[in-house]
Structures are given as C-alpha cells and as structure tokens.
Amino acid sequence: MRPVKQRWSFFSLRWSYQLGAVAGIVLLATAVFVLRSSPPGNDGPSWDVVRLEGTPRVGWHSVGEKSGLGKLRIGQTLVTDSYSRATITLDETGRVEVDAGSRLRLVANGPGRKRLSLERGTIHATIWAPPGEFVVDTPSAVAVDLGCVYTLQVDDSGAGVLRTTMGWVGFKLNGHESFIPAGAICQTRPKIGPGTPYFEEATASFKGALSKFDFASITPVERTALLGIVLADARKSDALTLWHLLSRVSEADRPGVYDRLAALAPPPADVTRDGILRLDRPMLDAWWSSFGFGDIYLWRTYERDWSQRPPNAK
C-alpha cells in the first residue's frame, strides 16, 4: 500500500501545480481585460460622444443606437470605420463632427487648453471657446483655433488640408506658420509643415504654381519662375498669399513680392519697404492686421504656448 500512496501524492502535487498555473493565467487574462476595458483618465473631464451613423468606438467600447451617450477621456481614441460618423461636444469649448474613416485622440483637457490629435480622417470643428484654447495636432502641423469654424483633413501619409469657414485658424510647425481666414485653404505635408494659404476662388494657374512652389523638389530657378506665375495672377484678395510669401522667398525675390503686394494692398504709413525687406516683425504684423483678416495680436499673445512640436509630428 505504501507505493500506491506515494504515486497518489506525486499525482496530487502535479495536478496542484497545473491548476495553480491555470488559475494564474486566468487571473492575468482578467487583469489585462480589466485594464484594457477601463477608460484612462477617468478623473478628468470628458467630451460627450454621440453616434451619427454606424458604430463608432472609443477604445474597446462601441457607441451605438442602444449604448447611448459615449465619453471621450484623456488618452482615449475615437475611431470611426468607413460606415461610421460621430460628434464630440464639450459645453464650454465647442462641437466637433468626426467623419468616417477617422482616428481622433484626446490629448489634453485642462482649463484653458483642449488638445486633440487627428491621426487620420476628417473633422469639422465649430468652436466657441476663447481664441487659443482649442488645438488640434496632426502629423505635419498644429491647428490653433482663433475663434472659428473649420474643416481639417489628414490622409494616411500624414498630409493635411485645412479649410476655414468662419473666423481664422493658425497653422504651425517648427517656426513655420500660416494664418487661414474664412474662405481660405492651406495644405500641409510631413517634415515640411503648412504651405502658403490661398483663397479657394484663386485661379487654377495661381494654385498650381503655389503648390509646386511650396512642396515640389525644384531648383531655385524653377521656384523663381513659379513665383512669377503667382505674382502675375494675384488679385487684391490674394494679398493673403503674398504676405506669407514675403518670409518664404529668397532675399533676391523678396522685392518683387513686396512691390506686387504694395500695389494690391498698400501698406500702412508706418510700414516701410526697407523694413519689410529685412522682415521686421512689427511691420509685417501691422501690414497683416490692415488686411481685415484678423488681429495678429491674438496669435502673438499665445505663440509660445502653441510652438510645441506635435507629439506625432514626423
């Protein structure tokens, strides 16, 4: 009987180890599931998420007809597939409609700063927060609301397009900045940042030359030739574009840009040709503010806060 008792003890011990291992695996899987299912940043404020079509998701949770109102908290990502759309709303900030095929993450939600990151897709933002409080990172630029309504698109390569419907938006990356007033559009590319803004009703040749000037790999001679097309086709409202070009052209090309801009929109009395040619910042700002697109003081006031590189910039 003693050998049988020893075999039984051996098998009991073996089963005990196996059961313990299984229990450990179950506990580990449960912990992982709970951690993945628990929304991060529960202690902070959240945006309300409402389904418009399909089944948008926040993390692992679906926002559908039966699931009711969703919540987007710091660190979470709202994902819409090709059949889904949603809106997110924060009472003191604004409303953002998220189109199909989008990924939108909430980065910050503190007092005076609401920050989203659009990894891909399209959003339509209607913002009533004070200027400078609502910021959207993209892979190639940071969009800063200055009291506006706008649409922002990002494709899978990280390239983006911003269209402003009301007010104006600041677009910036690594010291490269563009201002987009109502009716204007601005493209952006990874590693380059925002291009030169222009009004959508500009001529096709104007827009085509400007796009190549901003983003194509071309020689200085070719850039000067493209600039010539832009200057020749410029209308009075294209002062928006020419003002931006002052700081983007070569020193040799700058006098031609100044002369064409001055003919379309004469500078204020305290703005001189010499000052503009040496890119005197107060004079450039004064000339911009005379266009009626928006007071550049708003941008300069908060510029240091907005100059941070977007977390996902390439």
Image: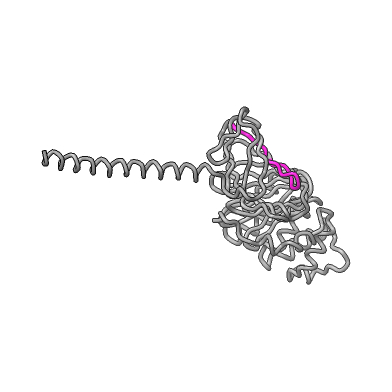
Which quarter of the figure has residue 83?
A: top right
Can the viewer see residue 203? no
Which quarter of the rendering shows the C terminus?
bottom right
Question: In the displayed structure, would residue 96 be above or below residue 233?
Answer: above
Task: Pinpoint residue 29: horizontal percent, then vertical percent.
Answer: 41, 42
Q: Residue at x 55, y 41 (%)?
A: 59
- Coordinates of residue 270 in the picture (x, y in percent): 86, 69
Asked if residue 142 lies left or right of residue 5, the reply is: right
Q: Residue drawn 61% across and 48% down?
A: 42
In the image, 76 versus 135, the foreground residue is 76
Depth check, front residue: 244 or 161:
161
Which picture quadrant has residue 299? Answer: bottom right
Image vertical order of residue 254 relative to residue 194, above or below: below
Q: Which residues are magenta?
A: 84-96
Any part of residue 156 in sight: yes
Question: In the displayed image of the protein, which residue is found farthest to the top?
Answer: 66
- Relative placement, left or right, of 62 versus 201 is left
Which of 196 and 173 lies nearest the eye of the viewer? 173
Give the overall secondary structure of the magenta segment: strand
User: Is 85 placed above or below 106 here?
Assistant: above
**Viewer-nearest residue: 47 or 81:** 47
Q: Magenta stretch: residue 2 in it?
A: no
